[in-house]
Amino acid sequence: MRLKKTQANGQIAVKRKKNVFLRMLEQWDLQILVIPGILLMIVFTYLPIYGILMGFQEYKLGDFPGMSQWVGLKYFKELLTAADFYRVLRNTLAISLLKMFIGFPLPILFAVMLNELQFPLLRKTVQTVSYLPHFISWVVGATLMFDFLAVDGGAVNEMLMAIGLVKEPIGFFMKGEYFWALVLCTDIWKELGWNSIIFISAITSISQDMYEAADIDGATRLQKMWYITIQSIMPTIILMFIFQVGGLLNANFDQIMQFTKQMTNAMLRDYADVLDTYIYRMGISLRRFSFGTAGGLLKSVVNFALLCLANKIADMVGETALF
C-alpha cells in the first residue's frame, strides 16, 4: 500500500492511499454503468475465442466446440496447399496495398488542404459533405455504383462517350481487370472524409505561434505545410499507418460481397475473391466450419505479426509506436 505525504500547518502528515477495490466500492454507482459494457465485451469478444479449437478439430454441426475429434494442423495445411489459395492471396494483397499506398495518404492530404482554406464556412461545408458517404451502407453504395456505371444509360458511360474518350460503353462489372481500381475508387469516395477526421483533429492542436514565426522568417505556404503541419502530425500518421499494416489481409468483406452480388458474378471472381470471401464461402456456405476457422485464425495471426513488425520498425527509427 503506497504512502502519500502532505504538509499542513508546518506539520507533515502521512496518509495511506486507499486500495483500488475500496475506491471502486465508493464509486459503486459509476461501476454499475460500466457493467453492461464489460458483459458485452465478454460475451462477444472473449467467449468466442474458445471456438478457435474448431480449427484443430473435425467439427461437425451439432458438436459442442472443443469436443470434436482432433486433427491437428490438417486444415491449415489444406488451406495453404489449396489450388485457389495463391490467387485469393494475390487479390487480397493487391487490394490492400492499393488502399495502403493510395487510399491512406489521401485523407492526410485532404486534411492539410482543408486546413489551408481561408473561408471557415467553405471549410466546414466541404468537411461535412465529405463525411456523408461514410454513413451510406455498402448495400446502398453498390446499388448507386451499379446505376452510375451501367452499360445502358449509366451516367459515367454517357459522359465518357459524350466527351469522346470511348466509342462504346465500358462494362465495369463485366471485366475483372477493372475490379481493383473500382474497389479502390469507391472506397476513397466513401471513406475519404471520415478517415481525415483524426488528422484534422491533430492539425487543430498545432500552435499558431509556429505559423506566425514561419511567416516572420518568410516561409512559403508549401514550406509551412511540410515543415509545420505535416511534421507536427507525423506521430498520428505513423500510428494510423501501423494500424493499416496490421489489417493488411482485410480487404473490406462487405464492399466486395456487394459489388460481386454475393460472389455470384463469375466474371469478377478471379480478381474479386479475397481471403474473407474465400473463408466465408468455404466455411459458411459449404459448412466446412473447421476449414473456415483455420483460415480466419491464420489470417488473424498474420495480421497480428504484421502489426508487431510495423510497430517494431517505427520504434527502431525513433517514431511513435503503439507499445
Image (spheres, helix red, strand yellow):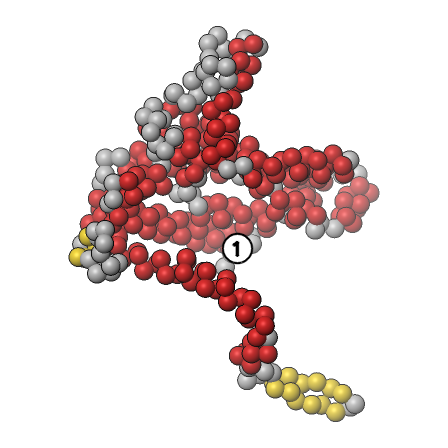
- Quarter of the figure with residue 114: top right
Label 1 sits on what residue type?
Ala
87 left or right, relative to 167: left
How many numbered marks does the figure carry?
Answer: 1
The answer to whether one can see residue 309 in this image is no
Q: Residue at x 42, y 30 (%)?
A: 259
Place of residue 32 in the rendered image (x, y in percent of width and height, measured from the top left): 54, 70
Q: Residue at x 79, y 46 (%)?
A: 213
In this rendering, would 115 be left or right of 97? right
Please name the residue shown 23% across and 54% down the image.
Answer: 62
Residue at horizontal 66 percent and vertical 38 percent from the top: 128
Q: Quadrant of the N terminus?
A: bottom right
At which x and y percent is residue 286? 25, 40
Bin the neighbour count of mark 1 within 10 Å (Cα to Cα): few under 14, some 14-19, many 20 and up: some
Q: Considering depth in this image, is 123 or 115 the residue closer to the camera?
A: 123
Q: Is residue 167 left or right of residue 228?
A: left
Q: Residue furthest right?
A: 216
Q: Position of residue 77 (x, y in %)?
A: 22, 46
Q: Secondary structure at mark 1?
A: loop
Residue at numbered disc 1: 321
Q: Is residue 205 above or below residue 123?
A: below
Of 132 and 17, the residue lying toward us:
132
